[in-house]
Amino acid sequence: MLRLLFLPICFLLLLGCGNVKINGALQTSSISGQISTVQLTSANDMNGVSQITVVIFLNNNNSTTVNFCGNVVNQMPVGNFVTVSFTQNQGCATLTFVAIETH
């Protein structure tokens, strides 16, 4: 009986530390469009100051803004049609795939 209680108690203690993350399956999103604007900026978070790349995609007269974690400016050529995949985190998205359409 004591062994059965040991694991749940350890689990609760680890969660109380604040530095332990238990993630389920990551959900990937994707977007395609012409890159209109790319701007490197910074934001304050728990770890200090982090870089964020703000990208505006244009597609069918609609614009969508995605805030990517880190500096991905070199992967987002303004004026090109791009398809990206990413996972959404708290505050920014982690880029997982980039395809740049070439003519």
Image (cartoon, rainbow, N blue to C red):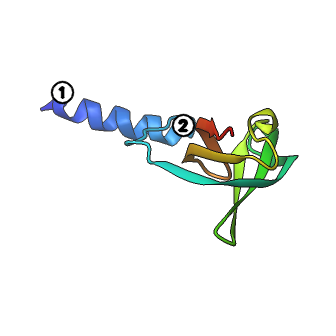
Residue 9 place in picture, x, y as percent: 33, 37
Query: Label 2, label 1: how many angstroms apart (C-alpha)?
Result: 22 Å
What mark, if any, has residue 40 been given in the picture? none
Q: Looking at the picture, which amino acid does disc 1 mark?
A: Arg
Examine the image and state in which quarter residue 25 appears.
top left
What mark, if any, has residue 3 been given in the picture? 1
Q: Residue furthest bottom?
A: 61
Q: Is residue 97 above or below residue 27?
A: above
What mark, if any, has residue 17 been given in the picture? 2
Q: Is residue 72 above or below residue 40?
A: above
Q: Nearer the viewer, residue 18 or 70?
A: 70
Residue 89 place in picture, x, y as percent: 59, 48
Residue 66 place in picture, x, y as percent: 69, 55
Left or right for 65, reference 28: right
**Which numbered disc flags the more N-terminal residue, 2 or 1?**
1
Q: Looking at the picture, which amino acid does disc 2 mark?
A: Cys
Quadrant in which the N terminus is drawn: top left
Residue 45 place in picture, x, y as percent: 76, 46
Residue at x-position 60% and y-position 46%: 83
Q: Is residue 3 above or below residue 49?
A: above
Mark 1 closeness class: few <14, some 14–19, many ≥20 residues within 10 Å: few
Quadrant in which the C terminus is drawn: top right
Secondary structure at numbered mark 1:
helix
Residue at x-position 50% and y-position 51%: 29
Examine the image and state in which quarter residue 12 appears.
top left
Q: Nearer the viewer, residue 35 or 90?
A: 35
